[in-house]
Image (tube, rainbow, N blue to C red):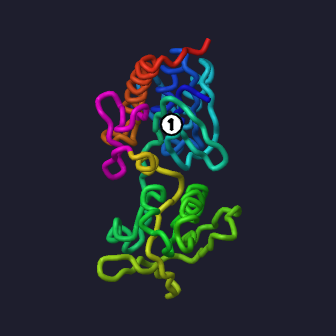
């Protein structure tokens, strides 16, 4: 068990780890890839680099720095966040407990372009199975996505819904889907409804799937989706934090692009540093012992 769990290995997450690990708290970073920075070939506006550097190089140096001072990196995908006796971060295969958790996953920059998706939000379209599964008890539902996050959401719905179907929308779905979950790989044309409620999914071949709900779980779990799973306040894709980077849930913090505002490395590093110093204060107040 760690004292601090950081979701995301970009500038915000690594910056947080540099503070908490140096303060003597066991710090674990969970991150699967380099996110949006992986596409940045030349970064010229970050302090301390005489020559341009790539996003991948910047992240690699940050991870090496965090490891040198004792932080642990786990290459995995986070699919859930909850609370038992401590905060719990869930991946597809494991779950990890900690006294403090920092969400530093960046911000989703794309949304599926499907007719009717935004129109039926809150009227059959949901972004959180843990939050909204209750409203679909005994009903037919679908999960839009094709990777581990979609499978995790589908499993969450299995014990509540009448039937669960994964819609990959033309993508190749992962192979380890249980037989209780149906799969449709056809491309989606639109979400259709009556009287302001979703009733079916229409595919480009003209066929329909009758459903009462569609849960959107494309790619990996976004920052606001993770926040909603534990009841933290969010505003659209932005996690709501105070001046100390704290969310509405004790022990849960957020930093970087996921808090909104200027999407720049300098801002992410500052917020990570702020979150790190505040987490240290929080752990000391809880009398969490420093690791020797």
149 relative to 195, above or below: above
- Taking the spot 54% from the left edge, 16% from the top edge, the residue there is 289
In this figure, which residue is indicated by the disc labeled 1? 87
- Across and down, in percent, residue 240 comes to 32, 41
- Across and down, in percent, residue 23 comes to 51, 15
Q: Secondary structure at mark 1?
A: strand
**Classed neighbour count for the residue bearing mark 1: other residues with Cα under 10 Å, few (<14), some (14–19), many (≥20):** many
Task: Assign the C terminus to one quadrant of the image.
Answer: top right
Can you see residue 61? no
Can you see residue 158? yes
Majority SS type along the magenta span: loop
The reply to whether the magenta stretch includes residue 238 is yes
Task: Give residue 121's quadrant in the image.
Answer: bottom left
176 relative to 257, above or below: below
Q: Is 69 displayed left or right of 223 in the figure? A: right
Instruction: Please report the bounds of the magenta region as a residue range.
Output: 232-253
Q: Is 114 displayed left or right of 209 in the figure? A: left
Task: Give residue 2's quadrant in the image.
Answer: top right
- Taking the spot 42% from the left edge, 28% from the top edge, the residue there is 272
180 relative to 24, above or below: below
The reply to whether the magenta stretch includes residue 52 is no
Q: Which residue occupies the extreme top position in the image?
A: 292
Task: Assign the N terminus to one quadrant of the image.
Answer: top right
- Across and down, in percent, residue 201 comes to 46, 79
- Taking the spot 30% from the left edge, 33% from the top edge, the residue there is 242
- Across and down, in percent, residue 110 comes to 43, 57
Instruction: Return the residue nearer the eye: 250 or 261.
Output: 250
């Amino acid at each position: 068990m760690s004292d601090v769990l950081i979701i995301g290995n970009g500038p915000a997450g690594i910056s947080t780890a540099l503070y908490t690990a140096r303060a003597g708290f066991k710090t674990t970073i969970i991150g699967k890839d380099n996110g949006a920075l992986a596409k940045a070939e030349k970064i010229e506006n970050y302090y301390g680099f005489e020559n341009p550097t790539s996003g991948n190089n910047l992240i690699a140096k940050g991870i090496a720095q965090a490891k040198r001072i004792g932080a642990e990196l786990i290459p995995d995908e986070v699919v859930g966040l909850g609370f038992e006796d401590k905060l719990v971060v869930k991946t597809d295969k494991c779950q990890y407990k900690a006294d403090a958790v920092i969400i530093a996953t960046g911000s989703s920059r794309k949304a599926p372009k499907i007719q009717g998706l935004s129109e039926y939000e809150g009227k059959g379209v949901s972004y959180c199975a843990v939050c909204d599964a209750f409203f679909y008890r005994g009903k037919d539902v679908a999960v839009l996505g094709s990777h581990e996050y979609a499978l995790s959401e589908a499993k969450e719905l299995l014990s509540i819904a009448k039937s669960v179907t994964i819609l990959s929308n033309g993508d190749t779905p992962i192979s380890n889907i249980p037989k209780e979950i149906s799969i449709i790989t056809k491309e989606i044309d639109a979400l259709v409804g009556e009287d302001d409620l979703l009733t079916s999914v229409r595919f480009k071949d003209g066929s329909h799937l009758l459903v009462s709900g569609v849960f959107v779980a494309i790619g990996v779990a976004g920052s606001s989706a993770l926040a909603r799973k534990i009841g933290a306040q969010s505003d659209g894709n932005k996690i709501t934090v105070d001046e100390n980077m704290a969310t509405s849930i004790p022990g849960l913090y957020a930093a970087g692009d996921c808090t909104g505002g200027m999407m720049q490395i300098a801002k992410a590093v500052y917020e990570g540093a702020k979150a790190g110093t505040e987490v240290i204060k929080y752990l000391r107040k809880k009398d969490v012992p420093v690791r020797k």
